[in-house]
Image (spheres, rainbow, N blue to C red):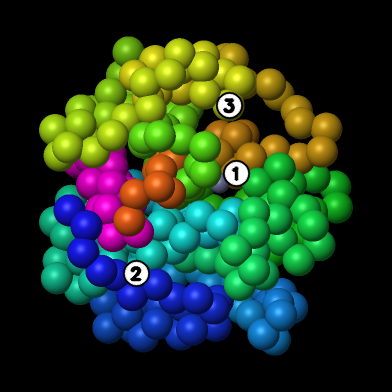
Amino acid sequence: MGGGMKEFLTSLDFLAEVERRAATAGLRTRILGHVTADSGRVPILSLSRKIPGAAPRILISAGIHGDEPAGPHAVLTLLNELMAGWDALRKFHIEIVPLINPTGFDRRQRHDGNGVDPNRSFGSPAPPPEIRYLMDDYRRRSIDLFVDLHEDVDTPGFYLYELSPDISAAFGPHVIAALRAAGYPINEAPVIEGMSASDGLILRTSRSIPRFFRQGSPQGLYMKRLGTRRTLTFESPPRLPLADRVAMQLLALRTVVDRFTR
Ligand SMILES: [Zn+2]
Protein backbone atom coordinates (compact mmCIF):
# COMPACT_ATOMS: atom_id res chain seq x y z
CA MET A 1 0.00 0.00 0.00
CA GLY A 2 1.00 3.65 -0.12
CA GLY A 3 3.50 4.96 -2.60
CA GLY A 4 3.31 8.08 -4.63
CA MET A 5 0.71 8.88 -7.23
CA LYS A 6 0.75 11.91 -9.44
CA GLU A 7 -2.22 14.03 -8.45
CA PHE A 8 -3.72 16.19 -11.17
CA LEU A 9 -4.59 19.56 -9.74
CA THR A 10 -6.56 21.21 -12.52
CA SER A 11 -9.56 19.84 -14.36
CA LEU A 12 -8.08 20.70 -17.77
CA ASP A 13 -4.84 18.81 -17.06
CA PHE A 14 -6.81 15.89 -15.66
CA LEU A 15 -9.17 15.70 -18.64
CA ALA A 16 -6.32 15.97 -21.15
CA GLU A 17 -4.78 12.89 -19.56
CA VAL A 18 -8.17 11.14 -19.57
CA GLU A 19 -8.54 11.79 -23.30
CA ARG A 20 -5.05 10.46 -24.02
CA ARG A 21 -5.60 7.25 -22.10
CA ALA A 22 -9.15 6.78 -23.38
CA ALA A 23 -7.92 6.96 -26.98
CA THR A 24 -5.19 4.41 -26.26
CA ALA A 25 -7.71 2.12 -24.55
CA GLY A 26 -10.03 2.30 -27.56
CA LEU A 27 -12.79 4.28 -25.88
CA ARG A 28 -14.83 6.85 -27.73
CA THR A 29 -14.91 10.31 -26.14
CA ARG A 30 -17.98 12.51 -26.38
CA ILE A 31 -18.40 16.05 -25.08
CA LEU A 32 -21.79 16.37 -23.40
CA GLY A 33 -21.41 20.11 -22.87
CA HIS A 34 -19.12 22.68 -21.30
CA VAL A 35 -19.00 24.52 -18.00
CA THR A 36 -17.12 27.69 -17.23
CA ALA A 37 -14.48 26.99 -14.61
CA ASP A 38 -11.79 29.30 -13.23
CA SER A 39 -9.33 28.06 -15.87
CA GLY A 40 -11.74 28.48 -18.79
CA ARG A 41 -14.29 26.38 -20.66
CA VAL A 42 -14.08 22.80 -19.48
CA PRO A 43 -15.83 19.90 -21.23
CA ILE A 44 -18.03 17.37 -19.46
CA LEU A 45 -16.79 14.13 -21.03
CA SER A 46 -18.42 10.76 -21.49
CA LEU A 47 -16.25 7.81 -22.54
CA SER A 48 -17.71 4.64 -24.00
CA ARG A 49 -16.78 1.30 -25.43
CA LYS A 50 -19.35 -1.03 -26.94
CA ILE A 51 -18.82 -4.70 -27.61
CA PRO A 52 -20.56 -6.67 -30.36
CA GLY A 53 -24.00 -8.04 -29.55
CA ALA A 54 -26.15 -7.76 -26.47
CA ALA A 55 -24.33 -7.08 -23.22
CA PRO A 56 -25.07 -5.48 -19.86
CA ARG A 57 -24.31 -1.80 -19.69
CA ILE A 58 -22.21 -0.36 -16.85
CA LEU A 59 -21.95 3.34 -16.09
CA ILE A 60 -19.10 4.54 -13.86
CA SER A 61 -19.20 8.13 -12.65
CA ALA A 62 -16.64 10.19 -10.74
CA GLY A 63 -15.87 13.69 -9.55
CA ILE A 64 -19.35 14.98 -8.83
CA HIS A 65 -17.96 16.41 -5.59
CA GLY A 66 -14.82 18.42 -6.27
CA ASP A 67 -13.04 17.65 -3.00
CA GLU A 68 -13.10 13.87 -3.57
CA PRO A 69 -10.16 13.25 -5.94
CA ALA A 70 -9.89 9.45 -5.54
CA GLY A 71 -12.78 8.81 -7.94
CA PRO A 72 -11.39 10.73 -10.91
CA HIS A 73 -7.90 9.32 -10.29
CA ALA A 74 -9.38 5.81 -10.07
CA VAL A 75 -10.81 6.40 -13.55
CA LEU A 76 -7.30 7.18 -14.85
CA THR A 77 -5.96 3.93 -13.45
CA LEU A 78 -9.01 2.09 -14.74
CA LEU A 79 -8.24 3.33 -18.26
CA ASN A 80 -4.76 1.83 -17.94
CA GLU A 81 -6.29 -1.46 -16.82
CA LEU A 82 -8.66 -1.42 -19.78
CA MET A 83 -5.63 -1.04 -22.05
CA ALA A 84 -4.06 -4.05 -20.37
CA GLY A 85 -7.31 -5.99 -20.83
CA TRP A 86 -9.65 -6.49 -17.89
CA ASP A 87 -11.53 -9.67 -18.66
CA ALA A 88 -14.68 -9.19 -16.59
CA LEU A 89 -15.20 -5.69 -17.97
CA ARG A 90 -14.95 -7.04 -21.52
CA LYS A 91 -18.44 -8.48 -21.02
CA PHE A 92 -19.97 -5.00 -20.63
CA HIS A 93 -20.83 -2.02 -22.73
CA ILE A 94 -18.85 0.55 -20.74
CA GLU A 95 -19.68 4.18 -20.13
CA ILE A 96 -17.55 6.41 -17.93
CA VAL A 97 -18.13 10.00 -16.83
CA PRO A 98 -14.70 10.90 -15.42
CA LEU A 99 -15.31 14.36 -13.96
CA ILE A 100 -18.75 15.85 -13.41
CA ASN A 101 -17.76 18.93 -11.41
CA PRO A 102 -14.64 20.60 -12.90
CA THR A 103 -15.00 23.84 -10.94
CA GLY A 104 -15.23 21.94 -7.69
CA PHE A 105 -12.17 19.89 -8.70
CA ASP A 106 -10.16 23.05 -9.45
CA ARG A 107 -11.16 24.67 -6.15
CA ARG A 108 -11.12 21.44 -4.06
CA GLN A 109 -14.68 22.11 -3.01
CA ARG A 110 -17.76 19.91 -2.86
CA HIS A 111 -20.11 22.30 -4.64
CA ASP A 112 -20.00 23.45 -8.25
CA GLY A 113 -19.26 26.97 -9.54
CA ASN A 114 -22.80 28.05 -8.74
CA GLY A 115 -22.53 26.95 -5.12
CA VAL A 116 -24.84 24.02 -5.79
CA ASP A 117 -24.35 20.43 -4.63
CA PRO A 118 -24.62 18.69 -8.02
CA ASN A 119 -25.45 15.40 -6.32
CA ARG A 120 -28.71 16.84 -5.00
CA SER A 121 -29.77 18.20 -8.38
CA PHE A 122 -30.79 15.21 -10.52
CA GLY A 123 -34.39 15.48 -11.59
CA SER A 124 -34.56 19.09 -10.44
CA PRO A 125 -36.63 21.36 -12.70
CA ALA A 126 -33.65 23.76 -12.94
CA PRO A 127 -30.47 21.68 -12.58
CA PRO A 128 -27.00 23.25 -12.93
CA PRO A 129 -25.55 22.87 -16.45
CA GLU A 130 -23.32 19.85 -15.75
CA ILE A 131 -26.29 17.91 -14.38
CA ARG A 132 -28.59 18.99 -17.19
CA TYR A 133 -26.09 17.54 -19.70
CA LEU A 134 -25.99 14.25 -17.82
CA MET A 135 -29.76 14.03 -17.41
CA ASP A 136 -30.21 14.61 -21.15
CA ASP A 137 -27.70 11.85 -21.85
CA TYR A 138 -28.84 9.32 -19.23
CA ARG A 139 -32.50 9.60 -20.22
CA ARG A 140 -31.63 8.20 -23.66
CA ARG A 141 -29.80 5.19 -22.24
CA SER A 142 -30.58 2.05 -20.38
CA ILE A 143 -28.02 1.28 -17.69
CA ASP A 144 -27.95 -2.05 -15.85
CA LEU A 145 -25.24 -1.34 -13.29
CA PHE A 146 -24.32 2.11 -12.00
CA VAL A 147 -21.26 2.77 -9.84
CA ASP A 148 -20.53 6.23 -8.39
CA LEU A 149 -17.09 6.92 -6.91
CA HIS A 150 -17.09 9.24 -3.88
CA GLU A 151 -15.08 10.07 -0.78
CA ASP A 152 -16.26 11.23 2.64
CA VAL A 153 -14.07 13.62 4.64
CA ASP A 154 -15.58 12.37 7.90
CA THR A 155 -15.18 8.65 7.45
CA PRO A 156 -12.44 6.59 9.14
CA GLY A 157 -12.85 3.79 6.60
CA PHE A 158 -14.54 2.67 3.41
CA TYR A 159 -18.32 2.30 3.21
CA LEU A 160 -20.90 2.10 0.43
CA TYR A 161 -24.52 2.64 -0.49
CA GLU A 162 -26.30 0.04 -2.57
CA LEU A 163 -29.76 0.06 -4.11
CA SER A 164 -30.72 -3.39 -5.33
CA PRO A 165 -33.94 -5.32 -5.88
CA ASP A 166 -33.15 -7.76 -3.09
CA ILE A 167 -30.94 -7.04 -0.09
CA SER A 168 -30.10 -10.72 0.33
CA ALA A 169 -28.49 -10.59 -3.11
CA ALA A 170 -26.56 -7.37 -2.47
CA PHE A 171 -23.00 -7.11 -3.79
CA GLY A 172 -21.92 -4.80 -0.97
CA PRO A 173 -20.97 -7.51 1.55
CA HIS A 174 -18.57 -9.01 -1.02
CA VAL A 175 -17.00 -5.58 -1.57
CA ILE A 176 -16.46 -5.06 2.15
CA ALA A 177 -15.01 -8.56 2.51
CA ALA A 178 -12.57 -7.96 -0.34
CA LEU A 179 -11.42 -4.61 1.08
CA ARG A 180 -11.04 -6.02 4.57
CA ALA A 181 -9.05 -8.99 3.24
CA ALA A 182 -6.73 -6.51 1.52
CA GLY A 183 -6.15 -4.76 4.85
CA TYR A 184 -8.14 -1.57 4.23
CA PRO A 185 -10.16 0.10 7.02
CA ILE A 186 -13.98 -0.19 7.01
CA ASN A 187 -16.38 2.27 8.65
CA GLU A 188 -18.17 0.01 11.13
CA ALA A 189 -20.37 2.70 12.72
CA PRO A 190 -24.07 1.77 13.22
CA VAL A 191 -25.14 5.14 11.80
CA ILE A 192 -23.43 6.83 8.85
CA GLU A 193 -24.62 10.18 7.46
CA GLY A 194 -27.77 9.82 9.57
CA MET A 195 -28.65 6.43 8.07
CA SER A 196 -28.55 3.06 9.75
CA ALA A 197 -25.54 1.13 8.57
CA SER A 198 -24.02 -2.26 9.21
CA ASP A 199 -20.43 -3.28 8.56
CA GLY A 200 -19.84 -0.43 6.10
CA LEU A 201 -23.07 -1.07 4.22
CA ILE A 202 -26.08 1.19 3.70
CA LEU A 203 -28.38 -1.12 1.77
CA ARG A 204 -31.80 -0.26 0.38
CA THR A 205 -34.29 -1.86 -1.95
CA SER A 206 -36.31 0.17 -4.40
CA ARG A 207 -39.29 -0.02 -2.06
CA SER A 208 -37.74 2.09 0.65
CA ILE A 209 -36.60 4.91 -1.64
CA PRO A 210 -38.55 8.14 -1.45
CA ARG A 211 -40.25 8.59 -4.80
CA PHE A 212 -39.55 12.27 -5.24
CA PHE A 213 -36.96 14.71 -3.98
CA ARG A 214 -38.27 18.25 -3.96
CA GLN A 215 -34.93 19.86 -4.85
CA GLY A 216 -33.49 17.06 -6.92
CA SER A 217 -31.91 13.78 -5.96
CA PRO A 218 -28.52 12.09 -5.79
CA GLN A 219 -27.34 10.44 -8.97
CA GLY A 220 -27.84 6.88 -7.71
CA LEU A 221 -31.52 7.46 -6.94
CA TYR A 222 -32.01 9.16 -10.29
CA MET A 223 -30.51 6.17 -12.12
CA LYS A 224 -32.77 3.88 -10.11
CA ARG A 225 -35.79 5.90 -11.23
CA LEU A 226 -34.60 5.58 -14.83
CA GLY A 227 -34.68 1.81 -14.43
CA THR A 228 -31.14 0.87 -13.42
CA ARG A 229 -31.43 -2.38 -11.51
CA ARG A 230 -28.47 -1.95 -9.23
CA THR A 231 -26.62 1.17 -8.14
CA LEU A 232 -23.61 1.37 -5.81
CA THR A 233 -21.94 4.44 -4.34
CA PHE A 234 -18.44 3.97 -2.90
CA GLU A 235 -17.04 6.23 -0.18
CA SER A 236 -13.29 6.12 0.53
CA PRO A 237 -11.52 7.78 3.50
CA PRO A 238 -9.41 10.84 2.55
CA ARG A 239 -7.14 10.34 5.59
CA LEU A 240 -5.36 7.59 3.62
CA PRO A 241 -2.87 8.37 0.81
CA LEU A 242 -4.43 8.94 -2.60
CA ALA A 243 -2.85 5.80 -4.06
CA ASP A 244 -4.52 3.66 -1.39
CA ARG A 245 -7.92 5.30 -1.94
CA VAL A 246 -7.62 4.70 -5.67
CA ALA A 247 -6.71 1.07 -5.00
CA MET A 248 -9.76 0.73 -2.70
CA GLN A 249 -12.10 2.19 -5.33
CA LEU A 250 -10.76 -0.16 -8.00
CA LEU A 251 -10.88 -3.25 -5.80
CA ALA A 252 -14.48 -2.40 -4.94
CA LEU A 253 -15.31 -1.88 -8.62
CA ARG A 254 -13.60 -5.11 -9.61
CA THR A 255 -15.58 -7.03 -6.99
CA VAL A 256 -18.89 -5.61 -8.22
CA VAL A 257 -18.09 -6.34 -11.87
CA ASP A 258 -17.07 -9.90 -11.00
CA ARG A 259 -20.31 -10.48 -9.08
CA PHE A 260 -22.43 -9.07 -11.87
CA THR A 261 -20.92 -11.32 -14.54
CA ARG A 262 -20.87 -14.41 -12.36
ZN1 LIG B 1 -19.34 12.80 -2.63
- Locate residue 58, reporting x and y percent: 38, 50
Say which of marks 2 and 3 sits in front. 3
Which residue is drawn at the image coordinates 52% and 44% (left, top)? 153
| Ligand 1 closer than 8 Å to label 3 CB | no
Residue holding disc 3: 193
Which residue is drawn at the image coordinates 83% and 32% (left, top)? 214
Residue 235 is marked as none
Callout 2 secondary element? helix
Say which of marks 1 and 2 sits in front. 2
Residues under labels 2 and 3: Cα distance? 28 Å
- Three-letter residue code for mark 2: Leu
- Three-letter residue code for mark 3: Glu
**Res. 46 in view:** yes
- Locate residue 237, reporting x and y percent: 41, 43
For residue 36, which quarter of the picture? bottom right
Which residue is drawn at the image coordinates 70% and 86% (left, top)? 40
Disc 3 + disc 1, Cβ < 8 Å = no
Q: Which residues are magenta?
A: 242-262
Residues under labels 1 and 2: Cα distance? 21 Å
Residue holding disc 2: 76
Residues under labels 3 and 1: Cα distance? 17 Å
For residue 89, which quarter of the picture? bottom left
Q: Quadrant of the C terminus?
A: top left
Answer whether residue 260 is magenta in the image: yes
